[in-house]
Amino acid sequence: MTENPFEIPQHMRDLAEQNMKQAHAAYEELTDFLTKAIDAWMSATPANSVVTEFNLTGFEDVQDRAVAMATENADSAFALIAKIAKAQTFQDISTLQSQFVQDRIQAYVTQTQELQRLIGEAFQKLQRGRSLH
């Protein structure tokens, strides 16, 4: 039986999947470390600092949402890699990449709008808080 020259060999798909799993595990370790480092830094910040004022006015919400969005975007990329690792042909890969780009563009538009809204709300809270003093 002749092999399809356009089909990706199974051993290459297996290797790609294994590499993706290792990369995802390393990413999880990195994000866990960064989250702990940011939390430690935030808790070590003096109570009367500008950071505390920003946190009280909604900027912590912006930070939390930005981190969540970055995680969502990374998870989406890892999901694409997992699908590509299982793809049978280069046409499958091309289709997956095209769909990924379309999905991510829409997600980035939505995320940007949400962050703009959250930042605007945080600045409004900050201004209201300063006008009370």
Image (cartoon, rainbow, N blue to C red):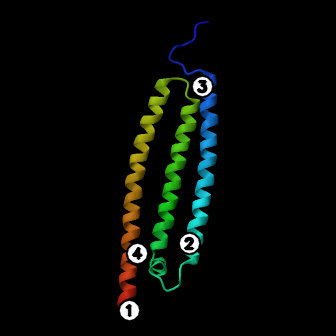
Label number found at residue 132: 1
* Residue at screen point 49% across, 27% down: 92
**Mark found first going from the N terminus, 4 or 3:** 3
- Tell me the CA gap for discs 4 and 3: 49 Å
Crowdedness near tag 1: few (<14), some (14–19) or many (≥20) residues, C-alpha within 10 Å: few
- Tell me the CA gap for discs 1 and 3: 64 Å
**Mark found first going from the N terminus, 1 or 4:** 4
Give the number of the mark in front: 4 or 3: 3
* Residue at screen point 47% across, 77% down: 51
Q: Secondary structure at mark 2?
A: helix
Q: Position of residue 23 (x, y in %)?
A: 60, 43
The answer to the question of whether label 1 and label 3 lie on touching residues, with beta carbons closer than 8 A, is: no
* Residue at screen point 49% across, 86% down: 48
Q: Look at the picture and state if 95 lies above or below 4.
A: below
Crowdedness near tag 4: few (<14), some (14–19) or many (≥20) residues, C-alpha within 10 Å: many
Q: Look at the picture and state if 41 lies above or below 84.
A: below
Q: Position of residue 43 (x, y in %)?
A: 58, 76
Q: Residue furthest bottom?
A: 133
- Tell me the CA gap for discs 2 and 4: 21 Å
* Residue at screen point 55% across, 24% down: 88
**Mark found first going from the N terminus, 1 or 3:** 3
- Which residue matches tag 4? 122
- Tell me the CA gap for discs 2 and 3: 43 Å
User: Is residue 101 found left or right of 29 in the rendered image?
Assistant: left
Question: The C terminus lies in which quarter of the figure?
Answer: bottom left
At label 2, the amino acid type is Trp
